[in-house]
Amino acid sequence: MLSTIGIPGLVIILVIILLIFGPSKLPKLGRSIGESMKNFKESTKGVLDDDDIKKEEKL
């Protein structure tokens, strides 16, 4: 789905986000999204590491 958006679609989405949140809140929004992605990656890394350990134990 994301591969069909293209550059014009992304520009329209960014303009709509700018109109909804305003320029003063965009840095806070970006920071919170970045922190959420970081936390998600850290938590999935722990799960993936646990799966690797279980696979090694079976061998």
Image (tube, rainbow, N blue to C red):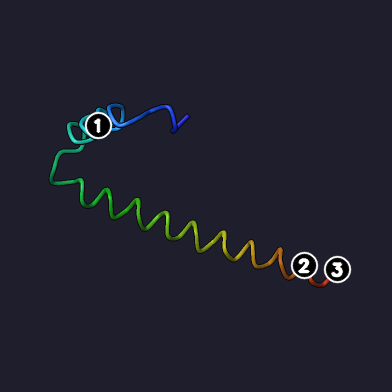
Question: In the rendered image, which quarter is residue 56 located in?
Answer: bottom right
Q: Position of residue 46 (x, y in %)?
A: 59, 66
Mark 2 and mark 3 residues within 8 Å of each other at the beta carbon: yes
Question: In the rendered image, which quarter is residue 8 located in?
Answer: top left
Q: Position of residue 25 (x, y in %)?
A: 18, 46
Q: Which residue is mark 2?
A: 54
Q: Position of residue 3 (x, y in %)?
A: 44, 32
Question: In the rendered image, which quarter is residue 9 located in?
Answer: top left
- Sequence order check, earlier mark of 1 and 3: 1
Left or right placement of residue 15 versus residue 56 in this view: left
Give the residue drawn at x 17%, y 31%: 19
**What number of labels is visible?**
3
Q: Residue 11: which disc?
A: 1
Give the residue drawn at x 63%, y 62%: 47
Q: Nearer the viewer, residue 56 or 17?
A: 56
Q: Residue 38: which disc?
A: none
Helix, strand, or loop for circle 3?
helix
Left or right placement of residue 20 versus residue 50 in this view: left
- Sequence order check, earlier mark of 1 and 2: 1
Instruction: Please determine whether, in this image, residue 52 is positioned above or below residue 2.
Output: below
Amino acid type indicated by mark 2: Lys
In whole angstroms, how far apart are the C-alphas of marks 2 and 3?
6 Å
Report crowding for label 2: few under 14, some 14 to 19, many 20 or more residues within 10 A (C-alpha). Answer: few
Amino acid type indicated by mark 3: Lys
Q: Which residue is mark 3?
A: 58
Left or right placement of residue 17 versus residue 51 in this view: left
